[in-house]
Image (cartoon, helix red, strand yellow):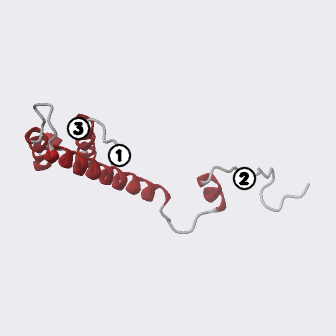
């Protein structure tokens, strides 16, 4: 099993993704049922002594997996919005999209010296 890092980092990451999801609603993310559930679950599975707690490790692994899913979905949506086909593009727009510059023609198309 790969190293998961501290559970507090995973919780902060989940709460960050929750803030991103609630940004458009105008409501504070702390008023959501998801926030209350996350905090309650992490508090309930907190280790209070130096003993192996399978439930705590299982919760941490599931939380890290869910964090990966939320982050990946958010990044996928951002990439999809940026690069999704918007119909026919002009040559200038297509070149600009991939970072190229077209040569400048002083007299426009068909200019002869």
Residue at mark 1 to residue at mark 2: CA–CA distance: 47 Å
Image quarter hosting the C terminus: bottom right
**The residue positioned farthest toward the top in the image shown:** 49
From the viewer's perspective, is 105 left or right of 65? right
Frontmost residue, 51 versus 81? 51
Of residues 91 and 41, the one nearer the viewer is 41
Mark 3 or mark 1, which is nearer the start of the sequence? Answer: 1
Element at badge 2? loop
Q: Name the residue under label 3.
A: 7
Q: Where is residue 83 in the image (x, y as percent from the top left)?
A: 50, 58
Q: Nearer the viewer, mark 1 or mark 3?
A: 1
Residue of label 1? 2
Residue 36 rendering spot, x and y as whole percentages:
10, 44
Q: Determine which quarter of the picture holds residue 3.
A: top left
Distance (Cα) linking label 2 and label 3: 51 Å
- Secondary structure at numbered mark 3: helix
Q: Where is residue 37 in the image (x, y as percent from the top left)?
A: 10, 47
Q: Where is residue 78 in the image (x, y as percent from the top left)?
A: 41, 53
Question: Please, which residue is most extreme toward the front here?
Answer: 51
**Total count of labels:** 3
Circle 2 residue: 102
Above or below, 107 against 3 in this view is below
Q: Residue at x 22, y 39 (%)?
A: 11
Check whether the beta carbons of the residues at disc 1 and disc 2 lie within 8 A of each other.
Answer: no
Q: Report whether 13 appears left or right of 75.
A: left
Q: Which of marks 2 and 3 is nearer the N terminus?
A: 3
74 displayed left or right of 44:
right
In which quadrant of the rendered view does residue 35 lie?
top left
Q: Is residue 28 visible?
A: no
Q: Which residue lies furthest to the bottom in this view?
A: 87
């Amino acid at each position: 099993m790969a190293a998961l890092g501290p559970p507090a980092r995973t919780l902060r990451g989940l709460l960050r993704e929750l803030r991103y999801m609630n940004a458009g609603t105008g409501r504070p993310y702390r008023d959501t049922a998801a926030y209350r559930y996350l905090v309650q679950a992490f508090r309930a599975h907190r280790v209070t002594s130096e003993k192996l707690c399978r439930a705590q490790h299982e919760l941490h692994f599931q939380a890290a997996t869910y964090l990966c899913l939320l982050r990946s979905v958010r990044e996928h949506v951002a990439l999809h919005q940026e690069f999704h086909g918007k119909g026919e593009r002009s040559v200038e727009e297509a070149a600009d999209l991939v970072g190229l510059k077209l040569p400048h023609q002083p007299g426009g198309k068909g200019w002869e010296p």
